[in-house]
Amino acid sequence: MSINQVDFYELCLDEGGDFYTEIYGLEKEDFNQWVRDNLQEIGTVNSYNEVVPSNEVLNGITELGYEHIHYQCHYSAKASTIKDSNFTYNTGFVIRNSFHYPIITHSFNTVNGNIIDFARIEDAEDPFNEENDSLPHTYYGIEIPREFILNYEQETLEEKSMKPLLYEWFLHNN
């Protein structure tokens, strides 16, 4: 799948529903072109072990006040960026080796160029099955600066907001 052929506008609405309803008011082609112009390939992983934060990283961010919620990618990536300035927030997409959902919306962090994906911390009651999870995964992101994320600190930390801020960053830049 070529990332340049993806209709990001429709993908966000189809797959991300409630998180992206505000983009209805945008011009579809303008939004798609802006995403293509700003989206960066961050990396490809063959195992979740490559992106799951270490216990040291998780304990450190938890000591700063981060509250983990399993599988809440947009919240987790924003909250960790708010709590620790070493984390960079990326919102975008993951291309997977899957016929049913080959690309999904996703938010994640980078630290020193390495992908950190809090959504890949397993919930013991609902574990991952890497054999069925369509690996490898290629992460694509649009970096949103921490200073911008801090404008959403209250709703992120208090309401555990899953709003990815892609729409807001688009408006900020257009």
Image (cartoon, rainbow, N blue to C red):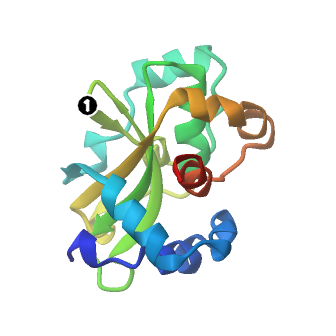
* Residue at point 44%, 44% (across, down): 108
> Where is residue 119 shown, x and y percent of the image?
49, 48
> Vertical placement of 142 versus 101: above or below?
above
* Residue at point 52%, 48% (across, down): 173
> Where is residue 82 shown, x and y percent of the image?
60, 26
- Residue sitting nearer the eye, 89 or 75: 89
- Kindly tell me whether residue 72 is visible in this rendering: no
Q: Quadrant of residue 76?
A: top right
Q: Amino acid at mark 1?
A: Gly
> Vertical placement of 132 versus 47: above or below?
below
Q: Identify the element where label 1 is drawn.
A: loop
- Residue sitting nearer the eye, 122 or 150: 150
- Residue sitting nearer the eye, 121 or 115: 115
Q: Quadrant of residue 79?
A: top right
The image shows a total of numbered marks equal to: 1
User: Which residue is the extreme one toward the bottom?
Assistant: 100
* Residue at point 57%, 26% (across, down): 147
Number of other residues with Cα within 10 Å of mark 1, as a class: few under 14, some 14 to 19, many 20 or more: few
> Where is residue 69 shown, x and y percent of the image?
63, 43
Residue denoted by label 1 = 113
> Vertical placement of 42 versus 15: above or below?
above
* Residue at point 62%, 69% (across, down): 23
Q: Quadrant of residue 148?
A: top right
